[in-house]
Every structure is written in C-alpha cells, then in structure tokens.
Image (cartoon, rainbow, N blue to C red):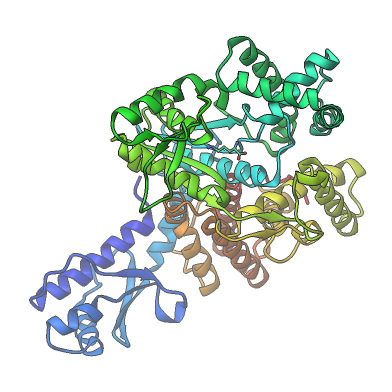
Amino acid sequence: MSYVFDEAKQEAAQLVLDALSSQGLRLKDARLVPTKDAQHGSLASSACFGAAKQLKTTPPLLAEKLASKISLSQSRYFASVTAMNGYLNFTYSQQFYYETLSQIASSSEKPTPTKSPSSYAPYGSNASGKGKTIVLEYSQPNVGKPMHVGHIRSTIIGDCFRRLYAFNGWKAVSMNYLGDSGMQVAKLLLAIELFQDMPEPKNEKIMLEYYVKIHQKIAEDPELEKKARQLLEKIEVGDPATLKNVRYIREKSYQAFQRNYDLLGVSFDEVIGESAFIEDSKKVVQEAVKRGIASKEKTGETLAKLEPQLPNTVLLRSNGTTLYLTRDVSLAEYKHQKYRFEKSVVFTAAEQNLHFRQLLRLLELFGKPYASTYHHVGFGTIDLPSGKMSTRKGNVVFLEDVLNEAIGFALKEVQSRQQAYAPETQQEIARSVGIAALKYSVLRIQMEKNIVFVPEEAVKFDGNTASYLQYMAVRAKNVFRKGKISQLPSLPTSYAFNSKEQELVSLLSFYPSVVSSSANSFSPQALCDYAFKLATCFSSFYDACPVLKAETDEAKAARLHLVKSTQGVLESALGLLGIQVPERM
Ligand code: ARG
C-alpha cells in the first residue's frame, strides 16, 4: 500500500532533484521534512544547503532560482513552492487533503493484537514485515514472588511492541521467560514438603503469604536453611524429580500472574521457565571451552574471557552448576531453532544492561548468525510518589493495588463529570480509564528515563493523559451519535479545506510513518506524542469548525469525514498502545 503522504513526498523530491539536475547537479536526496509551522508551507526541502557550495552560490540564491524553475502546473499534490531562507517550501494542493481523507475512509479497519494485516490493510499499517518473524520476550517475572514493577513496565512495553510489529506485517511471537530456578523456588519446594499443600494462588498476595510462611520457618531453623540449599542444588543440577515439582510451582504461580495479564489484556504465545535450559546450558559451557572462549580457572570455575571490552563472566560454578547468563545463551539458540526469527528483542529493567551486553558478545564469539539481530531494550525504574516500589523488605506494591487505586481516582473523576450515568456505567468507564492511565504513563516516557506514576494525575481528563485521549475519541464518536448519522456521506470532490481542517488532515497523513518509525526505533513514546498532538489538534478544529451545524452541506460532509478519520486514527493509535476506547465517557 502506498500512502498519500509518501507519494506527495516523492513528488516533491522529484521536483527538487530535477530542478537541481537542470543546474548540472545530480543528487539522490531532496532532504524533505514536514514543516512545523503552516506559514512555511507543508513540506520543506533543505537540499540547497548542501548543493549551494557545489554550485558555487548561496543557499538563499539557489532556493530562489529553483523555486522559479519548478513548475507545478502538472502537480498532483502541490499548489505552490516558495524559497525561504535557503529552504524550498512546498504547500499542499486541495487534492492532497481530498486524497488523504479518501484513503483513510477506504481502509478503516481496527488493528488487532495478533493478526498481521495481510488480508486487510487498516490505515497506518504496512507490510514491511511480511514473511518475517520477530520474537518479543517480556514480562518474565520470577516464580514464587510477586511481579515487581520492573516486570510491569516490561509487560506493558512488550505488549505494545507485539501489537506494533504485527501491525507492520511481522509475525510477532510473544514469549514469557519465567525465573524458576532461584532460591525462592527452592524454598517453595521445601514448603510443599513441609506443609503438604499449596493454597489456590487466586492472587499474588496469597502466593506471597505462602512464601513468607516458609521464609519464617526457615529463619527459625538452620536445618531447613540447609535443606533449601540442597533443593536449590537439585534444581541446578537438573534433577528430574525436582524439576517436576518446579514445574508444578511454576504453573501455580502463573495462575496469580495470569490475573494481572487479564487485567492488562496481555497474552503470550509461549511461556517457558529458566529451568528448561539447565541441561542445555551445560553443553554451552563445553562448547565455549572447546572454542577457547572460556577456560577452567584454578578456583574451579569456568570463566568466559570478555576483557578488555567487558568484564569476564563465570559460565559454570565450581560445583558444576550453570548461571543466569549461561542459560540465556541456550535460550537464544532455542528461540532461533524454533522460530527462525529475523529479529529478537528482550525487554528488561536497565539493571540488566551489562548482562545483555555480555550475552550479545558471547553470541558473537560463538559465531551465531543471529547475534546481530538479537536485541535488548533496557528501561528505567517506575516508582509511586510515596517511595520506591520494591519486593524487598516486605514493602511490596502489588499491581492489583496500583490499578485499583488508579480506578478509584478515575471513578471520582467520572462521578464529578458524568453524574447522570448509572453507577455501573461509571464503574465501567473508571476501569477502562484506570488501566489505560497506567499503560500510557509507562509508554509515553522515554525508555531510559525513570517514571513516577501518580495515579490521581494520570486519570485526569485534561493534560497529556490516556483519559484525555480516550475522551477525545469518545467526543468524536458522539458527533455521529448526536447527529444520528449511521452512514458517512461521500466526500465532496471539490471542497476547499480551511486552514484548521488542513492542519488536521496533514497530521492524519503522517500516521503511517509514525507507526513504522516507532516500531523501528523501539519508541512507543513517538506514538504517544503523535496521539496527543492529534487529540489537541482535533479539539481546536472542533472548537473552531461546526460539524453538524456546518455552513453548507459540503462542509458538513467534509467535516464528518474529518471527525470519523480522526476517531479512527486515534482509536488505532490507542489500540496499538493497548488502550481501549470506551463507548461513553
Ligand atoms: N526473570 C528475570 C528477572 O526477573 C528476567 C528475565 C529476562 N530475560 C532473559 N532472557 N534473561 O530479572
């Protein structure tokens, strides 16, 4: 599918390059970008800045000359071109706005989290990933402990990329790699032995209580501590009977995690535990020694030599057990064998950056062909204003509590705005708003930065919040409800769009490029920024241009198209972020 914006850009580029070539200079790139200010036209070319020197003139003089050479009498998308301080500014013709809106109207299906747009092509999607597979690894909590907020950030970000990549035509596989071979699991194994049963882990609190119970027992009795260590060793040497029990604990714990995933609307194609890679990772060590990547030290450990670029790292302890990193090498190979991916990404807290740099280096040293397509994205912390959220020292913050708090604040907001709604409707809106608030608060911040999640701020209906965006999409929907319009009238062919309308259509025309660039540069915040800009632009259009009471039938039809397109694009962008738009707000 080729989008109107891309075609227009191509047309302008050709005009610039042809004009330069008439001056005797052949270039490949017309350096075109959308302008920030409509006063400067629609698309600006900075080609004259590079070209002037070669043509022994100045950028302003060259721009003047080219502007006078370029003829737009045959142009499809441009009405004028002017020179301004060395730039060449192209201004869209009415045809551009007409074609953009028609294109949106003819491709307005909603994205889905898993289906690649192969059989259908919703506006904004592309087929750049056609036939390619990406494996996205996210969430990845540790069994036996509650999910901490780092896992929550990873869950929200990973899920967004799953949607984005699927929308870009990729086969996007989501994987949840659970930490199930640490001390906490050994303690739970002991708990099962001692207490005989495990409670139904209806939520994370019940799991934690069970964990705390065994923890206390162990603290009272050093013999039990010893037993737990032995069990850990049994896990790490891969004792089959022990691993069977590990699997049981993992499945039980997962029931508690599942509640969080259900709340967030997140699902996985594959869930696998670290313990599945214990056997295989021993072979990794042998292979590393054989290839001279690692060697056995006097201390008995097998050490991989990564210096001077990176710190050396232990692959096998002296007691014959493997480590987190060793298992990650096996996991990478497993993923590649199984999915033959073109790209693989792991999302974790930035604390693990070094671990992943070491992993990628090891894959390189092993000569893995997929080493350069294996990526790690690390992100900052997320805190509540009252202090750090952490699972250590018992000041645990449960996702469920965070969401309930956000939903509570959202309910207050809805109650004060929509007193006429039935309590169930208010509750339903508050749920959607609360969950969206957390997701948007995570996604709109650059990955590297830390986040402070302030629930009462995040659910406000104005400002850069999910609620504001949801509210704008609902407002757009309401136009149709209020006007009792079920069928969109056809778009008038010769309508002259005013400047407010032009601004909105221009923004709508960028959506496809925002979708592809936020996927390629792993930047959900670009999509958030876009959605916010679109909502703000829509609001100012809506204040200035009456829709149902438009001056003429033509204006009414054109504006209904604008409202419908904005609603569709806003809903699509929010859908990619994992945010639903309620029917009413
Ligand atoms: N379970 C780990 C943790 O909670 C994260 C796993 C990340 N993925 C990986 N392939 N190492 O820290």
Ligand 1's quadrant is: top right
Up the image or down, 207 lies above or below 423; here it is above
Judged from this view, the residue extending furthest toward the left is 24
Seen at 80% across and 20% down, the residue is: 191
* Image quarter of residue 557: bottom right
The percent coordinates of residue 462 (x first, y second) are 74, 65
Expressed as whole percent of the image width and height from the top left, the position of residue 438 reads 71, 50
Q: Is residue 126 above or below residue 288?
A: below
Q: Nearer the viewer, residue 560 or 286?
A: 286
The residue at the point 27 percent across, 61 percent down is 10
- In the displayed structure, 204 sits above or below 25; it is above
Residue 248 in the image: above or below residue 383: above
Residue at 73% x, 57% y: name it: 453
Q: Position of residue 95 (x, y in %)?
A: 38, 63
Task: From the viewer's side, name the closer residue of 151 and 480.
Answer: 151
Residue lying furthest front in this view? Answer: 298
Label tally? 0
Q: In the image, 181: left or right of 118?
A: right
Q: Is residue 106 something that shows in the picture?
A: no
Task: Give x and y (percent) for residue 397.
Answer: 79, 46
For the N terminus, give its image quadrant. Answer: top left
> Which quadrant would residue 54 be assigned to in this image?
bottom left
In front of the other: 169 or 418: 169
Q: Nearer the viewer, residue 169 or 399?
A: 399
Residue 446, quarter of picture: bottom right
Is residue 531 something that shows in the picture?
Answer: yes
